[in-house]
Image (cartoon, grey):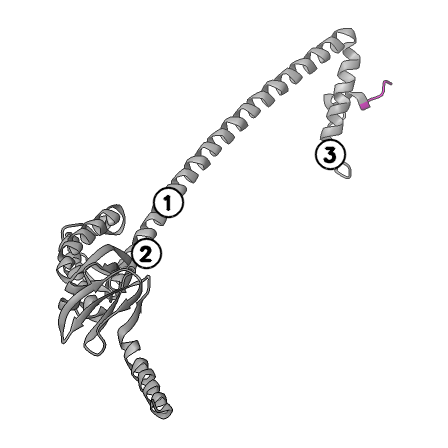
Amino acid sequence: MNPKRLILAFAAIVLIGGVTLPQTLFTITEWEQSIITMFGLYRRTIKSPGLKIKIPFFETVHRFDKRILASDAVPGEYLTKDKKRLLADHVTRWRIEDPLLYYKTVRDEFGAVRRLDDIVYSEMRRTLAEQDFTDIIAEKREELMETIAQNAQGLARQFGINVVDVRIKRADLPTEVQASVFARMVAERARIAKRYRSEGEEEAQKIRSQTDKEKTIILAEAYEQSQKTRGEGDREAARIYAEAFSVDPEFYRFTRSLETYESALKSGATYLLSSDSEFLQHFQTSQ
């Protein structure tokens, strides 16, 4: 055979192989799954990873994620059983369970998220409408989320989707309601503070009254004790004076007169008294 023709034939084979081989062989990773279609008709599903073969140019590979996906929905407003408005921001975690059904119904992830949001919004609106605001915020939150996830899972299966769970990322009052709620909170705190101040003032008044009472009692007891002590002192002084008087009456009268002079006569003062006054008897001299 002509060497030139051999080269051309080899080049043609390489060219055809280079074009057809990428269309024949493809790889499925560990986090992927796929379906094969031919002219829009379903052929088969591939869930195991590795190198795969398809009919070149005729079969098409549609790849889907096998991992758990998450959709962060736009916050929605809900009405609770006690007629309060709740603004909730939920997150849905899900995975593609049936690639063929998923492809037929929602086509891609954008369509799946739109369908899931509709389902979860509907279930949350129905479930939260049967509960009070405080139960949703605190007491029954986990239980309610499990119920919503189970109901959403049953509805999402028709799209080949398995809902793993639903969680409320944030739950709050609408912005226009928060101002009135904060105002009520401030008023409530002011009322409590006023009550505490009133109770404190009442307790302080009791303490002051008790203190004044104890003060009066202490002063009365002190006055009583001082009067007793003073009386005992006067009695003892009278006894001493009596003893002194009985020993030397004349000397006793003389000392008592001196004490009287000291207290009655002031320096620089002028007194007019009779010369025979008994008050001045100790100033008189015998003739």
In the image, taking residue 248 as reference, residue 131 lies left or right, namely left
Badge 2 or badge 3: first in the primary sequence: 2
Q: CA distance from mark 2 to mark 3?
A: 84 Å
Residue 13: horizontal and vertical position, in percent? 31, 83
173, 152: nearer the viewer: 152
Q: Which residue is mark 1?
A: 196
Residue 197: horizontal and vertical position, in percent? 39, 46
187, 155: nearer the viewer: 155
Badge 2 or badge 1: first in the primary sequence: 2
Q: Check disc 3 and give the amino acid type.
A: Tyr
State the mark number for residue 150. Answer: none
Q: Check disc 2 and give the amino acid type.
A: Val
Q: CA distance from mark 3 to mark 1?
A: 72 Å
Badge 3 or badge 1: first in the primary sequence: 1
Secondary structure at badge 2 equals helix
Q: Which residue is mark 3?
A: 271
In magenta stretch: residue 200: no
